[in-house]
Image (cartoon, rainbow, N blue to C red):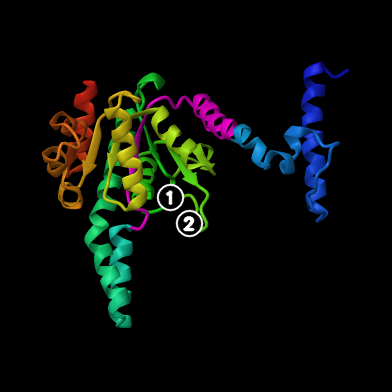
Amino acid sequence: MDSPHNLHDRRLADAWATLKSHSDSGLPLGADATRLAFADPEFLLRRETRGIRFQLELLKPDLEQQQRGIENTIVVFGSARFRSQEEADALLKAAQADGDDAALARARSLVRNARYYEHARAFGSCVARYSADKDSIDKLFICTGGGPGIMEAANRGAFEAQGVSVGLSIALPMEQGTNPYVTPDLSFRFHYFALRKMHFMLRAKALVAFPGGFGTLDELFEVITLVQTRKAKQVPIILFGSDYWKRLFNVELLVEEGAISREDLNLFQYADDPEQAWGLIRDFYQLPA
C-alpha cells in the first residue's frame, strides 16, 4: 500500500502530466475550473496572481542555493558586449578584410576593451581557487547576471579553476541565453528585475563592477544606494577600471554640489588588477592570503 506521502507525490505528478498531455495535443490553454490551481498556468499568469509569482521567483533560487551550500557570493557586473581577446582579435581581422568602416570601429573598441574580459576571467579564477579547500561556510562563489561578456568571463574563470558559480539571468526580448560556464543547477532565470536584484544582494559579500552600460549602472547605483541608506549591510564595492569610471561620472561634482557627502566616497573603491580587487575584498574580511 502506498504511504500518504507517496499518494500526495503521485497526485502532484498526475496534475502536471495532464497539463503536459493537453499541451502536447496542441489544445489551446483556456480557463478550466477543474484544473488544480498550482498546475494552472492560465490562472498563475493572471494579473491578480502577480504576488504569487513574486514569491515563487524569490523562493526557488533561494532554496536551490541553500541546498547547494551557496551562502556567500561575490557579485560581478559588467558589459554583456565585451569579448575575449581571442574573439575580439578575430572580429577585428574579419572587419579589416571586409572594409566596413562601422564594423571596423566596433571591432577596434572590442579589442580595446577585451582586457576587461580577461581581467574578469582572472578574477573569477582567484575567487574559485581561494574557495577550493574551504569549508562550506567559508566558501565564496562568483555570481553574475549569467549572460555574455563580463558575466561570461567571471563564470568562465571560476569554471576553469574547477569552481562552481551562479548565474541570475533575465528573460528579455533580445536575450542571448545563459553563458555555458554557469554551473547548470545554479543557473536561474527571472522575469522580474526587482526579484533578480534582490537575489544579487541576498548573499553578496562584495560587488565588483566592471565597465558596462545602462544595466551595469542601474545595478551598481542601486547597490550603492542600499548601502548608503543602510538598507543593506556594508560590503566592498569595487569599480574595476578606474579610468573608465572616473571618466564616466564625476563624483567630486556630487560632493561640491552637496548632492552627497564626502564620506559617501568611502562606499566604493577602485581597482585595475584582478589581484588588487581580490586583495581589497580579502582585507575587508581579513581573509587568509
- Identify the residue at image location x=19%, y=52%: 244
Where residue 99 appears, x then y in whole percent? 29, 83
Q: Residues within 10 Å of mark 1 (few under 14, many from 20)?
A: many
Three-letter amino acid code at the position of disc 2: Gln
Looking at the image, the residue that sits furthest to the right is 1
- Identify the residue at image location x=14%, y=40%: 257
Q: CA distance from mark 1 to mark 2?
A: 7 Å
Mark on residue 220?
A: none
Give the residues drawn in magenta, as a range.
Answer: 54-81
- Secondary structure, mark 1, is loop
Q: Splitting the image into 4 quarters, where does residue 13 fall?
A: top right
Of the pair 119 and 256, the residue shown nearer to us:
256
Q: Is residue 136 left or right of residue 252?
A: right
Is 201 part of what is drawn in magenta? no
Three-letter amino acid code at the position of disc 1: Gly
Where residue 25 appears, x then y in whole percent? 83, 54
- Identify the residue at image location x=33%, y=82%: 98
Q: Residues within 10 Å of mark 2 (few under 14, many from 20)?
A: few
Residue matched to label 2: 176
